[in-house]
Amino acid sequence: MNLLTILDKLSDDKFFTTETSRLGSLTSLSNFGKKAAVAALPLGLGTMMATSAKAEITAAPSFAPADALTDALQLALVLEYLEDEYYRVGLAKAGLIPANDRVVFQQISKHETAHVVYLKAALTSLGTTPGAKPNFDFTAKGAFDPFNNYQQFLTLAQAFEDTGVRAYKGQAGNVASNKGVLQAALQIHSVEARHASKVRRMRANKGWIELKNGGNMPPATDAVYAGEENIIQAGYNTSTLFGAAAGSASFDETITGAQATAIASLFFA
Amino acid sequence: MEKQIQVSNKGATLDTNRRNFLKLGGVGLVVAGLTLAGCRDDNYQFVEDPVFDLGKGDVGILNYAYALEQLEADFYTKVVNSFYTGISEAERQVLTDIYNHEVIHRDFFKAAITAATSQVLPKLEFKYDGIDFKSRTSILATAKALEDTGVAAYNGAGKYITNLDYLVIAGKIVSVEARHASAIRDLINPGSGDFSGDDVVAANGLDVAKEPKEIVAAAGSFFKTPFTWKEQGIG
């Protein structure tokens, strides 16, 4: 592998995501150092390399390996299992969800159930056995009481939906090798965003995330919003026109598979 | 190479992306060269009737997104410059926020494409036949159509993007469009399942994805300035 190929690999986010899921944070950190080193090259040198590297990528697209694809789908399946069970239990709990709001959660629940079915079928079609549903503890070991307290039910619903949006986005590089899966993942991703906007609005929040403020959320959900305050997109400062709140809200941010798993595992029994 | 690996990560995102823009810039130059060569024989006509072609590869996708964001930004600019009769404070807030986001998206694409290639879609003009900017019903229905169209467009275009950094950017924008769509739908029909209604989310739980050709056909009545996208069979 020559230098330019290495540089190209380092420039692809999915490379890091893959490494992160395999080898843990140490590898991830060291890779980030390498990436930063590349970025810090003098401009002229970077230009020369970029031009040559382009030819390499055109000749042999370096997509993430096939198991990165199925790993991404397994992660998505865990998140959908979590959401699916959460809404089904909530809807089944007498007196929890006010009559006027049931239609909202019936709609969301229907979609999460369909997402579980879809992802299982996708994994099976790729020759991979779908992971089993984890056992969930939606109290997070006693920290929450969502099935007896409707405000907490809404709070966690918002956290799950906003997490889902970020997690799907974070897997884009891992599923890009399969155009069918990529498109389906995008189509699920936007449904999660529709849900997130609605649940946020039910909690008297805006449908979009300004800065890293989830909107009247407990500190336990800080990880869901960390990084959402980003205002630099591909070098463009989104705060220039209308300030940082609008700028940050106009782009949602990703989270890595490791970050998504860390959030979800708060709710594993 | 080994010696260069121990530097601060400050500015990593920006510079990495600049590298990718430069990479794309190379593609753009090639495309521009081909266009020029192709037009050599009828250069005269080209000058008289300069219909812009969105381009090939990622340049085409970026210009496509830029065209759609120009449309959304233009529409909401008209909306906020003269709100419809009897607008509520909550609706004013939602529409103002969406206006801000769409203008930011538009300017982002202009900056991003300009940094990557000389083949930048010019400022487009739009027309709004049959839309009554004084009518809540008309404006919210148009906003809903535009946001749903944006979602379907990004969902359908993702697979054509080759640069993964651009794919992630598209993902960052499309979820905001979906948040908008949900909020607008909620204003139109509160207390319903319309925020992610059965008209846009299929029984398998998937949102709409449309090919560029379908999107341009559907939104074509808004575009006063013509453009082509030969790579996608448009024009």
Image: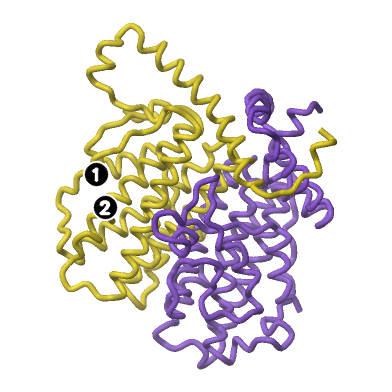
Residue A140 % position (x, y)? 71, 82
- Relative to A84, A28 lies left or right: right
Q: Which mark is residue B75?
A: 2
Q: Mark 2 and mark 1: span between their CA atoms?
A: 10 Å
What chain does mark 2 sit on?
A: B
Q: Residue A62: name its quadrant.
A: top right
Q: Residues within 10 Å of mark 1 (few under 14, many from 20)?
A: some
Horizontal arrangement in the rendering, residue A31 relative to residue B49 (left or right): right
Residue B208: percent from left, percent from top: 43, 52
Q: In the image, is residue B195 above or below residue B232?
A: below
Q: Which of the chains is purple?
A: A
Q: Residue at x 65, y 70 (%)?
A: A223
**Badge 1 amino acid:** Phe
Indicate the quadrant containing the C terminus of chain A: top left, top right, bottom left or bottom right: bottom right
Give the drawing colour for chain B: yellow
Q: Pick whichever of labels 2 and 1 is earlier in the sequence.
A: 2
Q: Amino acid at mark 2?
A: Phe
Q: Callout 1: residue from which chain? A: B
- Does dot 2 land on a helix, a strand or a loop? helix
Residue pictured at 54% horizontal, 38% vertical: B161
Residue B40: percent from left, percent from top: 36, 8
Can you identify the residue that label 1 sits on? B222
Q: Are marks 2 and 1 in contact (CB under 8 Å)?
A: yes
Residue B99 is drawn in which quadrant?
A: bottom left
Looking at the rendered structure, the secondary structure element under dot 1 is helix
